[in-house]
Image (cartoon, helix red, strand yellow):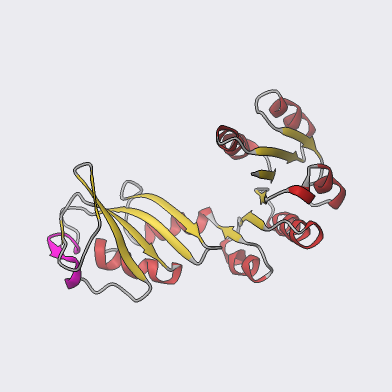
Amino acid sequence: MRVIVVGSGKLLYYLTRQFASKGYVISLILADEAEATNLSRRVRALVMHGNGSAPHVLEEAGARRADVVVALTPKDQDNLAVCQIAHKMFRVPRTVALVNDPQNEEVFRELGVSVAFSSTQIIARILEERAGFEDIANLIPLAEGRVTISEVALREDAPGADKNLRDLTLPEGALVGGILRDGNVIVPRGETFLRGGDRLIIISRPDCYDRVLRVLTGGES
């Protein structure tokens, strides 16, 4: 896979390291020349200094052959511009953007960004639902943000504990896809009994996710 990442900071470094471990061909574009020079010595990637929203810079980074362009700058307008230029000018099939202001998340999707994610929105959702960070191990958007997969710990005192799955009124558009218990994976059925300490794999639409957590963990918006 060929990936172009536009951004800066530790997130860019760790993400690049992760991509390199998978054998991806990576190009990085950084606005800060000193940071670009330093990073070029630390990662296995083509590292460029420049404006990632400039078409000639994206082209030099290999946009015409890229499978994915990821925009991780601290400015939403720059991230949107990077993704739109990559998609419209270079026909990059998949674009991913960090949305710093969660109010812009829907706008990004409407304007054609494949995946727009807001770390602020994810953290706020967890806090509002009274599910501590230890309760949710993974929160992963899929299918261009239309589906969320998460791993949720079921506490001993949670409303969903000590009940059969069929007795829980989960919203339409959500399901428990698996249960991790004592090192084993259980594919649940309606009669499956949920226990405190289970870790549940939840598959849901984003608009259902809050209600699923309320039913299982007792959190309230």
Direction top: furthest residue: 41
Using the rendered image of the protein, determine whether residue 220 is visible from the camera's viewpoint: no
Relative to 66, 10 lies left or right: left
Query: What's drawn in magenta, residue-wise?
Result: 159-167
Using the rendered image of the protein, determine whether residue 1 is visible from the camera's viewpoint: yes
Direction right: furthest residue: 56
Q: Is residue 27 above or below residue 161?
A: above
Q: Quadrant of residue 7?
A: top right
Nearer to us in this view, 159 or 165: 165
- Residue at 31%, 50% (x, y): give it: 135
Relative to 175, 51 lies left or right: right
Image quadrant in which the C terminus is located = bottom left
Nearer to us in this view, 165 or 12: 165
Nearer to us in this view, 204 or 99: 204
Magenta highlight on residue 113? no
Q: How many marks?
A: 0
Q: Is residue 85 above or below residue 173?
A: above
Q: Quadrant of residue 183?
A: top left
- Residue 211 coordinates in the image, percent (x, y): 34, 70
Direction left: furthest residue: 162
- Residue 164 coordinates in the image, percent (x, y): 15, 66
Image quadrant in which the N terminus is located = top right
Nearer to us in this view, 219 or 69: 69
Relative to 157, 141 lies left or right: right
Q: Quadrant of residue 118?
A: bottom right
- Residue 177 coordinates in the image, percent (x, y): 31, 60
Direction bottom: furthest residue: 172
- Residue 52 coordinates in the image, percent (x, y): 78, 47
- Residue at 72%, 39% (x, y): give it: 27
- Residue at 59%, 64% (x, y): give it: 105
